[in-house]
Amino acid sequence: MLLSECLQHASLIDCLRQSPVDSESIAQMLWAIIALPLAGAFVSGVFGRMLGRANTNLIACAAVAGSFVLSLLAFWAVNDPRTALLSSFSQDPVRYAVAHDFGTWFAAGTFRVHFGLMVDHLSGVMILVVTGVGFLIHVYSTSYMGHDEGYGRYFAYLNLFIAMMLTLVLADSLPLLFVGWEGVGLCSYLLIGFWYEDAAKAWAGRKAFVVNRIGDLGFLIGMFLLALWVAAFQAQTNNAGGQGRALEQWRIGISQQGPLTFRGLEEAVRRIPPAAAQLRDAVSLDTSVVSGPLKGTTFGQVLLAVLLLFMLGAAGKSAQLPLYVWLPDAMAGPTPVSALIHAATMVTAGVYLFSRVGFLLVLEPTAMAVVALIGAATALYSAVIAFVQDDIKKVLAYSTISQLGFMFMGVGLAVFWAAILHLVTHAFFKACLFLGAGSVMHGNAEETNIKRLGGLRRQMPWTWATFAIATLAITGIVPLSGFFSKDAILHGVHGTDLQGYPWVSNTAWLIGLCAAFCTAFYMVRLYVLVFEGDRSPEARTAKAHESDWPMRLPMVVLAALSVLGVVYGIPLIAPASGGPAQTVMENYLSTVSAVPQQLARIHHTLRQGHESSLLVAWAQAWAIALAGGGLAGFLYLRYFPSRPKLQVPAFARALERWVRHGFYVDQLYYFAIVKPTEFLSYVLYKVVDSFIIDTLIVRGVAWITARSGAALRYLQTGNAQSYAAVMALALLCAAGYAVIQVLK
Amino acid sequence: MVPINNYLFLAALLFCVGMFGVMVRRNALVVFMCVELMLNAANLTFLAFARQRGDSVGHVSAFFVIAVAAAEAAIGLAIMIAVFRSRGTLNIEEIKTMKH
Amino acid sequence: MSFLQSHLVNLVIFAPLLFAAIVAALPQTEKQQIRVATLFGMAATLLLSLWLYLGFEPNGPEFQFEYRARWIAALGISFHTGVDGLAVSLMMLTALLGPLVVLASWSFIEERVKEFHFALLFLQTAMLGAFASLDLILFYVFWEAMLIPMYFIIGVWGSEERVMAAVKFFLFTLIGSLVMLVAILALYFISQPAGARSFDYGQIYNSLLSATREVSSCARAGGVCSGLSPLARNLQTYGPWMFFAFALAFAVKVPMFPVHTWLPDAHVQAPAAGSIILAGVMLKMGTFGFWRYAIPLFPVAVRDLTPLLASLSIIGIVYGALMCLAQRDVKRLIAYSSVSHLGFCMLGMIAITEEGAAGSAYQMLNHGISTGALFLLFGMLYERRHARLIAEYGGIAKVMPVYSALFLIITFSSIAVPGTNGFVGEFLVLLGTFKSALPRFFGVLAALGVILGPAYMLWMVQRVFFGPLTHSENQRVRDLNLRELATALPLVALAILMGVLPQPFLSRLAPATKLFVARASLGANAASDDLRNLEMKVLDLPREAALSSRPSSATAADNPPTSHTRAFEPHR
């Protein structure tokens, strides 16, 4: 419909919401969103050298830009109120979602996986972030990697990463999500170890991959258990409670699409009545599984195990305790890679996963408590480590881990919209910070030690401005987007009550406040040491030079987005169902989080209500941010510079060393896990394989055979007469035997 | 009529003498002669039983034995000549190439 | 049935032998001619085999393209060949690797070229025949025939300690096979009454069906029962032993722990071509033997021994991976990784679920491609540097970028990154393990292979390809030439294709998988299985007059007395 026609009978906003392309075409085109960066990766990788630097840059950026345009169209289609999707799992159409099934991937027995892609409000936001920020970083990379010979390889890997991340986000089933999940891990390995001639950098890539794999193990086992769970549910559930037709429809959907699609899981979970309802013959969370491999456990227990295993996977991918150790080392890769992968997109996969399966999470308060507490603990833990880091990228890495902890806190206590909002704003300001760090490194001959920088405020104005804005955003000293998103999480966490674990929300909230204080402190410390004051005498170059426009432009755009993102965080919209005003993001994501909220209500697993008013929460958060930032500013602008010969007590120095090395957790893992495994394999090889099996048994048998042969050889005397004597003896015995037999 | 046992004892005696000779004597030609002795002992046994049974089965067998003995003597003596030519001795205890 | 229908399998099996005869007639000095002729022969086999593969109907009868002719009728041995889904896939794999092996040895083998290529072609025939035979003695003949050319390939054209490795390989496999021969003979005598005996696989299986069910219901009831038919009583007494004999032969081939120690030596000492064939095809003989013979013929024994077999498989997975971490020699590392991967195959079969069996069958194909490619690629590096130790390399990616890229892709296939073929196989195997009756922690232990795999492979990749160029000899190695690229690319492309579009391959394996699971779980639960669904429908022996086979369905009224397909209907 043309705009002019539309304006005749509807308002401008409503007309703009109608997408130009109908949802069916968008659905069929979804594969192109992934295919474009994939094609770009292939072309850059194989033909990069032939095409030359400029062409490769163009192709790579164009691929992501094209993907961004398509994502925009998909996003637009999903916003259209007319969009409705017929799902094979239920009779009612699903609104605000677009999906298409592109055929079977693989199928065996009762299990099948399809190439199904789906866009709804949640993935719509994600694909925009991935392709948008990805595009900016591609542009930045054209200048940052401008002197590197491996540009073809670099852009191939980067495009492949975008394709894999999009697969992760667009997947409509868990196995396909896992494809993207591992794919981004693979690209992370390739990109961290990009400068492979440095053995340490290559090693960092390998560490990332192996630690990720430990998490992926949890994810895989969780998937298998979930498939078993669905099979048991299918077998045991009956049509009690008037759900006959719905269940019938669901069964058809499962047989057509496989057991692990998100839609199928959601519909299954909606058919579970609450335990309190005591419906006879219905399958509830307390029912035991009667047959099959899960026999003896209840449905709820299996679900809890699945969620905890997913948390293990998310801990690996999103660098939470205890599997965060790869992220600080991942800073060995090029800085744009750190910006894209380790700040904006890959590490957020765990948060996305839990938002996707939010309807499973809200059924198990224990799992929610675990997720929230891990998130909170990680947030504080890594914030403390960030206090004493001297490497600019390491500070940002630990900061990322900390912010991810915030997001997991939000997810754990079912404030999904706040976690996603923080994901988006974090993508903006953290990417801006990393790009700024890269710019600083570029302009200072790759210096990363912040103690050797300083005074860049006047020498690199553009970098300074964007970095400052992003710092303000992350700390919340000036209420930019980061302030509202972080506070949304804290406020939501504070107001949620978990059934059975009433202390969790308050604990998480308090830890979150401490972590917010720490965030403000270390970020301001970083900013002050790098940009304020005088240039350090140990700097590598006399003067720092500002970067050129391909590096400046993305930083500016991201900084602007960090500011503009405020819009999503301010409660402006009155929801249709009454209650307090919602933020734009909350309202937007309500289409996705409606089901988890409904389930939480029905099963009485949590209660969301705000004890304190929003303004009080804002005031508290702002005060904390100011306190943290102010303390850091005071210490590093006034206190330390005015006492250059300050004697730090030995105890404090030892403490600082302990914290700076990450509490020596890396060494702990090395001595507790890596060394024993290597030792075990060495022992097994030398003792069991080489000695016992090969030498004792195999060669032993051969030796015995040879020795017996050598012994029996002595029978061959070569003397014909001795042979004749033996024959005669045998004849005698035979004759004697015959005589005896005859006489018997 | 001479009882058959006498012939059988004689044949057994001849056989044992021959066997003893095969196992003990060092000269290859003497060993051959002892083998002939053993064969003739078998012949004697055959004939004795043939006489007792009254049919000619034993005689036929004896003819077979004689023919085989002749063939064996011919080949064996030829081998002995070849061995003597290559080694210069007919002492069996010195012909031990098949020793391990 | 047309001429092609009945004779295509024989053509595929004997085409390499024909070309072997041609190669034998060529003069010894014309090395290039010999190579071209062999390549031609392998390519012809590949085309025929592709025809066979594409002509195989996934939804058709179990055994297709059957051929049966009288051979040694007095002993009940007939020349009976035919393919089911798994056999035709493995034959396709064998035929695919054939030309690649010849191309890999193009510049590497310079002495006794004629004998080498003759051995390769002979080996090809033997392997194809083993997959396709449906008569136990015929299978045994091809099985043993495989050993001889492989022995020569390792022993003549291998590395320093080649003779030791060749002898070890030969004797190890032979001992297993001899025990299997005893079991085959035992089956022959036990399973059928005198006068109607034959070595035909279908006939033996059908004869054992009802006896197996009796034995399994007896086993469910406690173990000591009366009223068993004499056949069932024999089966109960000797079944476990016969299974053990078959299992020993196949376990040596797979190789399973603890009879695996021949493999590292054989791989290290063999030339590249030998390693590719050994890892790519011959190891699958073991798993194929379990799939086709050991497990379906003795399901009760398998059920009793499931914990042991599953434990051995998992030990294979974890132990094999741990071994890899301690290796200094690249080929030895890849050899131990084979032990680990085939542990997954075995586990999928022992789980006796459809997902697990499908994963196991698919993993057989995957392993052939990815490990074959690993040996192929490393052979190219070895040809340049004649060094096998990891310490002699370092920083290779700088001087051989294309090679490193291909090697990296194959590494990812080996560690089961989604998007490559390894993922589909491992996923299905692990899913099948969790779905089976095995305890949970078996699946968890097996999944440890997912972590250990990247640990050793990426460690090796890093030490060989990444890092600084430490040795000066490595600076002069050249990247892949066109021939080498053409040899490696098909495998790399297949690794990705089979990962993204596995369904065409899986659909050919699906009916064989279903039947395997049904046969292996015969008698597992109290519900009676319909034995008619499990019977093998194979060709009958052709009549005396005509020498060509004549198809006869199971319902034909004029069955010659050697057929027993109607004699064992379930009677109650």
Image (tube, grey):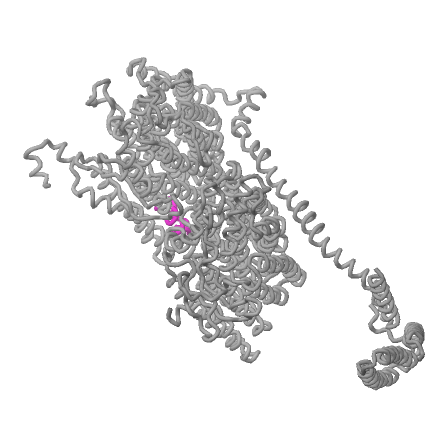
Magenta stretch secondary structure, dominant: helix
Q: Is residue C105 left or right of residue C539?
A: right
| Residue farthest toward the left in the current orientation of the protein | A8
Asked whether residue C58 is drawn in magenta, I would say no
Residue C482 visible, this angle: no
Residue A734: x and y in percent read: 83, 65
Q: Is residue A412 left or right of residue C388?
A: left
Asked whether residue A144 is drawn in magenta, I would say yes
Residue C85: x and y in percent read: 43, 57
Taking depth in this image into account, of A154 and A95 the one nearest to the observer is A95
Quadrant for the N terminus of chain A in the image? top left
**Numbered circles on residues, count:** 0
Residue B100 visible, this angle: yes
Quadrant for the C terminus of chain A in the image? bottom right
Q: Is residue B17 left or right of residue C378?
A: right
Residue at 17% x, 43% y is: A21
Q: Is residue A3 above or below residue C283?
A: above
Taking depth in this image into account, of C206 and C513 the one nearest to the observer is C206
Q: Is residue A93 left or right of residue B9?
A: left
User: Quadrant location of residue C138?
Assistant: bottom right
Q: Which residues are magenta?
A: A142-157
Residue A389: x and y in percent read: 48, 29
Q: Is residue C176 above or below residue A164?
A: below
User: Quadrant location of residue A422?
Assistant: top left
Residue C186: x and y in percent read: 61, 58
Taking depth in this image into account, of C421 and A190 the one nearest to the observer is C421
